[in-house]
Image: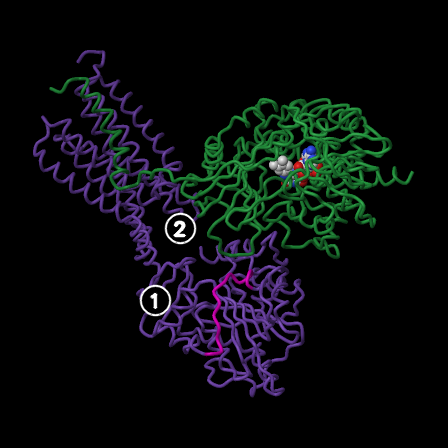
Chain colours: A purple, B green
Amino acid sequence: MSGRPVVTPVTAALFITVLLIAACGLVYELVAGALASYLLGDSVTQFSTVIGTYLFAMGIGSWLSRYIGKGLIARFVIIELLVGVIGGFSSTILFLAFSYTDAFRPLLYGLVLVIGILVGLEIPLLMRILRDRFDFKDVVANVLTFDYVGALGASLLFPLVLVPRLGLVRSALVFGVVNVLVALWSTRLFRESLPRRGWFIGVGIAALAALGVGLAGASRITALAEEGLYADPVILARDTKYQRVVVTSWKDDLRLHLNGHLQFSSRDEYRYHETLVHPGLAPLADAARAAGRTLRVLVLGGGDGLAVREVLRYPAVQSVTLVDLDAEVTSLFRSHPRLSTLNAHAFDDARVRVINADAFVWLDGAADRFDYVIVDFPDPSNFSVGKLYTTAFYRALARRVAEHGFVTVQATSPLFARSAYWTIVETMREAGWQVWPFHVYVPSFGEWGYVLAGHAPWTPPSEAAMPAGLRFLSARAVPALFDFPVDMGRVAAQANHLNDQVLVRTYEQEWARINR
Amino acid sequence: MVSRRAAIAAAVAVPAGVLLGAPALVGLLRKAPRRVTGGFVDDGSAVGHALRDGTRPAAPARRERVPIVILGGGVSGLGAAWALAREGLRDFVVLESAREAGGNARSGEMEGMRHPWGAHYLPVPDARNTLVRELCTDIGLLRDGVWDERALAFAPQERLFQHGTWHEGIEPSFALTRAERDELTRFDATMAEWRARDAFAVPSVECAARTAREWRALDRQTMGEWLTAQGYRTPALRWLVDYGVRDDYGASLETASAWAGVHYFAGRPAHDAGPLTWPEGNAWLIARLLERVGPRVRTNAPVWRVGREGARWTIDTADIRYEADAVIAAMPVHALARVLDGVSPAPVTLDRSPWLVANVLLDRWPEERGLPVAWDNVIYDSPSLGYVVATHQSLRTEQARSVWTWYHAPVERDAASARRWLRDLSWGEARDLVLNDLRRAHPDIDGCVARVDVLRYGHAMPRPTPGFLDATAALRAWQPGPRFALAHTDASGLSLFEEALERGVSAARQVREALRA
Ligand SMILES: Cc1cc2nc3c(=O)[nH]c(=O)nc-3n(C[C@H](O)[C@H](O)[C@H](O)COP(=O)(O)OP(=O)(O)OC[C@H]3O[C@@H](n4cnc5c(N)ncnc54)[C@H](O)[C@@H]3O)c2cc1C
């Protein structure tokens, strides 16, 4: 061949091929790294090990290329098709594997290895294909140039466009499509030297179709993966205006999850709810009965009606007002046969009134006073819910509680989130409440914490004060709830305010440590 | 054989087709942009411009005798009224040209959500600032040394968008070299030291730095020149300081006096629990002031002539000529110049900063990266000042919609051409300016915005350029006639709530003393 390279259409097209496949290769690597960081945390480790494995695999691919003697073009097309399909579906496979199997890590590195080997084969093969059309020094220079340019393009595209616009599942699929199109295009480019062309085209179109189906169903795949995070069969899943409600069931165990967080398991929820309601309410009901008075009870949160079920055990209770944001949750627990059985049809009791409203705003606007208030909100895991755990909230609450009344607040786990728990206690104290912290063991949750608070002295209930039919709590057991073992004991904490939300930060740190 | 041209065309078209077509194939291309409604909001400049252009209404038929007349119902005018009322005085009126009092602290409402149109916060006043603390105590914000928690900006208070994600706080602290970090530390340390020396304070008129020669030297140079002279080159630091002077003064490193720039950092404690803020911004404070002096405030009452008749001041509005012993001028000096008749004009004119404010109605929230939405949201290296979330001070846990107040001080042009640019701006251009800016941090903003309302301020506030200490001292000494006091923040040169209140209260004291004499 002559010294000066001739830019034929075919060679120009080939260099663009190099650019595209380089971009694809890098995208798969970035997808794997990002996905592993996202699901496993610790992005430095995930990216380092993924990149290392990938580069090493490319080395294996390059080394293997020596064993490909003839049929270079057919081999190249096959590799493109394989990379397209495997790389394209890599993030889908990994997402689902994380949810449904224990084999995420082996699969991750396995996939990275396979894709890396295939990508490692691409460039050496292409160079050899081009060798016959070009001077060798030009082949090396041009191929590597386009390779690096493609990599740059991909690395910019990935954080700026792909992840924000498409997400990880779709990004990989889109680049899978690119790989397969490169394969199809190569069958056209090299139609003279490619045997069984029709067969390759057929396979290519099938691969495109598969990737297309993947793209169309990408959001379903993400949802499917999420459902896989639940251990038990899902019997009901619903997106309300505010949250994702999932009910799972396994034999006699019924579980409610809101936004992926377990709210209760029917196997042990009675432990949680009896402890939430009775230590504060039993003494009040006892005194009311003796004096011939009735009680007004307020439940904030707790749209499942399980706390209301406990409250309704007292004849002295004249009314129960339940304020919960989500009308779909309260109506679900009123009408669903299994769920309403669980709360003993609490919402059908004439004493119960359900109000669907944002609790803080409702509390501010309310004029009534209550003898007993149960505050059962989701944990303070974000700044929005965090507002419901501030001195401002507990001050507003105080205005709605009768002079001799009490409140009980669910206050996350004093074992897993010890500082967060004592922050809540301190916040109530700073808001002017006298506080009695206590806790209980709920198998499906672990150790759980509450704060009982009031403005008058509290004494534990007598045996006679406890309602009939309890499955867990007895008067004898109550004082023990107020004793904290050393590892959950009080720690110094600052009160939580609207303008600092120290609780959300503490909570986040502590649970992050547990969930690692 | 395919022709060479066709092949090259194919070589370009096919990959381009792949890249563009693949997403289109599966419906991933962006939908046509949704319709955004909105328009310009009345800036109240019509009256001023008519006066400037020489239109003079006929002399009013009715006369009313009122011992003290306050011109302008912004913070300074209402502050003066508050001070008079606290002394038990009732024989005064406040004349305000707009439909509602408030001036730069006015507010609006979008679909039931209140939002500021201008001033939106008050920093927690430090112990030295007794006057503002008095007001806060009077209106129930401060009780037994404890601030009303609901008025302090909710967490997270501030965030900065940089390197593709949101970080807490607005000081850039990400991806800096050692040398850059050292420079930021050196700057912070210098400001901390100067703060400790107590020379700069808010309100500023009485503070030592206004008179001490060592500090006055700062007023001979711009903040940019001073930074350069001190060896501050780090872009992140220069950005932060530029942001500060744009935010408070509508000025830039190239135009702000170094004295004013330093005051921004050294005049207040470094950290406090605040600021104090409300959904409608400082209009909340205006409402509290109006609870105290409201009956004396006459709105829709532009003053178009102020002159003297014998020993009295005469103040003309459309239907009433007020005859007053004393006048408190709480309107900006450039507007005052147009209405003063037959008395000596103000000795100086001040540069004034134009502003552009937009209120953006969102019917859903954009996706977030990094720290969740804060009260004040700043985009690094953006020409805008970012946005304040008007619904942030809500006690709701769930908010489907929101209003964002977006601020922009156009400093890239000189004030006069910026004003012309503002005047000629169409609403569509303003909307694009806002959305393009928000898109830097929120790629999906177009799908969230339903409405953009825009307010243009041609002469929003005095701009503290080098030499402003002398200029404002001359304004404070200016006496166009007996029993006259200038209350507007122009007399301080720093447009801040605290300055306005202090100027108003001090003007009230001044005329009371003059009346007693
Ligand atoms: C966009 C913007 C944001 C700001 N943000 C803040 C902030 O967050 N915090 C802060 O402390 N400060 C802020 N400021 C500064 C603000 O200007 C001051 O805090 C304060 O409101 C100034 O009050 P003032 O009374 O001195 O002046 P103005 O508010 O200018 O009041 C002057 C009044 O005089 C009236 N007037 C004018 N001409 C006439 C006439 N001929 N007859 C009758 N009345 C007349 C006007 O209508 C107006 O009501 C901001 C300013 C702007 C423009």
Number of residues whose C-alpha sits closer than 10 Å to that of mark 1, classed few (under 14), some (14–19) or many (20 or more): some
Q: For numbered disc 2, what is the local secondary structure? A: helix
Could you say where residue A246 lies in the image, as x and y percent from the top left? 36, 63
Q: Nearer the viewer, residue B290 or B473?
A: B290
Pointer 2 residue? A40
Could you say where residue B148 lies in the image, as x and y percent from the top left? 67, 55
Is residue B389 at least partly visible in the picture?
A: yes
Ligand 1 quadrant?
A: top right
Is residue A131 at least partly visible in the picture?
A: no
- Quarter holding the C terminus of chain A? bottom left
Q: Which mark is residue A248?
A: 1
Q: Residue at x 61, y 52 (%)?
A: A499
Which amino acid does the dot numbered 2 rest on?
A: Leu
Could you say where residue A468 lies in the image, as x and y percent from the top left? 49, 86
Q: Nearer the viewer, residue A356 or A64?
A: A356
User: Residue A464 occupies which quadrant of the picture?
Assistant: bottom right
Task: Please tell me if label 2 and label 1 are on a single chain.
Answer: yes
Chain containing mark 2: A
Question: Residue at the front extreme?
Answer: B61
Q: Nearer the viewer, residue B467 or B372?
A: B467
| Label 2 CB less than 8 angstroms from ligand 1 | no
User: Residue A102 occupies which quadrant of the picture?
Assistant: bottom left
Is residue B258 found left or right of A120 in the rendered image? Answer: right
Q: Which residues are magenta?
A: A350-362
Is residue A181 found left or right of B403 in the rendered image? Answer: left
- Quarter holding the N terminus of chain A? top left
